[in-house]
Image: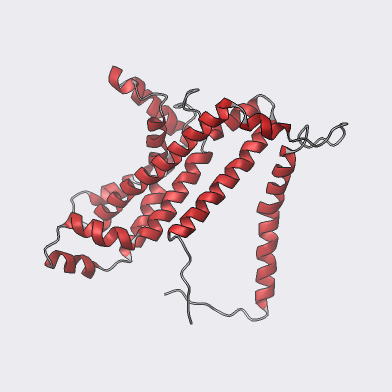
Amino acid sequence: MARIFPLGPWRWVAGALSVGFIAVMIVLPLATLVMGTFMEFFGNFDTAKVWTIHHWTAVFTDPVFARSLKNTLVLGLGAGIGGTLVYSVISYVIVRTRLTGRHIIDILSWLPWALPGVLISLALLWAVLGSGDYVKLIYGTVSLLIVAIVIKEMPLGTQIIKASTLQISHELEEASSASGASRLVGFCRIMLPLLRPTLVAVGIIIFISAARDIPTVIFLATNQSRTLSLLMLDYISDANQEKAAVLGVFLVVLILALLLIGWLLGFRRSTVRS
């Protein structure tokens, strides 16, 4: 069980270091990014007109932005929900069953971390284009991007859920089985409710990864399935850092809104009492 340890006078030092770290690593870069979105030219103060909101209106009135936002939301929700379910099943098989070869499954679940995202994207591209006419139809769709993100985040999602599953007592499932419930019913009625905070956390992590990922989807997306991160890359390649900064700030706001929703759904820090 987690416990609180009093730091005494050192709490002021620890608090100052924490505030300083947050200010240097998060607040200052984000403030610079926000400021850049309102500048005529990012970082240039030697112009007659320094400040403007033109970049915000240009981005939000661009039909490409609306399509990219839709693709990003579909990708994030699809990968978050689908990936969480897949990782839950994999973790349950590894921890709770005696299936032959489950240790191999555990080892293979780490494999995506051994490959850069670009290689995962390239491998999926070759697999899709070389697997027949019907499989080629999914190229350039958001569904293929979801598969790529689910594969990429498998090590993290599986290990987080596996660690939480290990903390749930076997007796709960044994009591369910003794009452006549099947393994599937026990998994759905006992394991999933107890794992809800963990599943919400994993879903949020996957959504964030999907929203900002570029290497894993760069070879799989087309103009119709472009995400906000790829649109931001397009702006940067066109030397339009101001619009890219607008998208960066928008992604930060989108992720913060998602974290708030996750907090309301149950992803809260447990109160520890001494």
79 lies above or below 268: above
At horizontal 24% and vertical 60% (from top left) the residue drawn is: 189
Q: How many marks?
A: 0
The quarter of the picture where residue 178 lies is bottom left
Q: Is residue 110 visible?
A: no
Considering every residue shown, the one lying at the far top of the view is 133
Please provide percent x and percent y for residue 222.
Answer: 47, 23
**Where's residue 253, x and y in %?**
59, 46
Q: Quadrant of the N terminus?
A: bottom left
214 or 271: nearer the viewer: 271
Q: Does 13 sit above or below residue 187?
A: below
Residue nearer the viewer, 135 or 129: 135
Residue at image x 18%, y 50%? 100
Q: Is residue 245 above or below residue 109?
A: above
In the image: residue 94, left or right of residue 213: left
Q: Is residue 19 visible?
A: yes
Residue 127 position, x and y percent, is 34, 25
Pinpoint residue 203: horizontal percent, then vertical percent.
42, 49
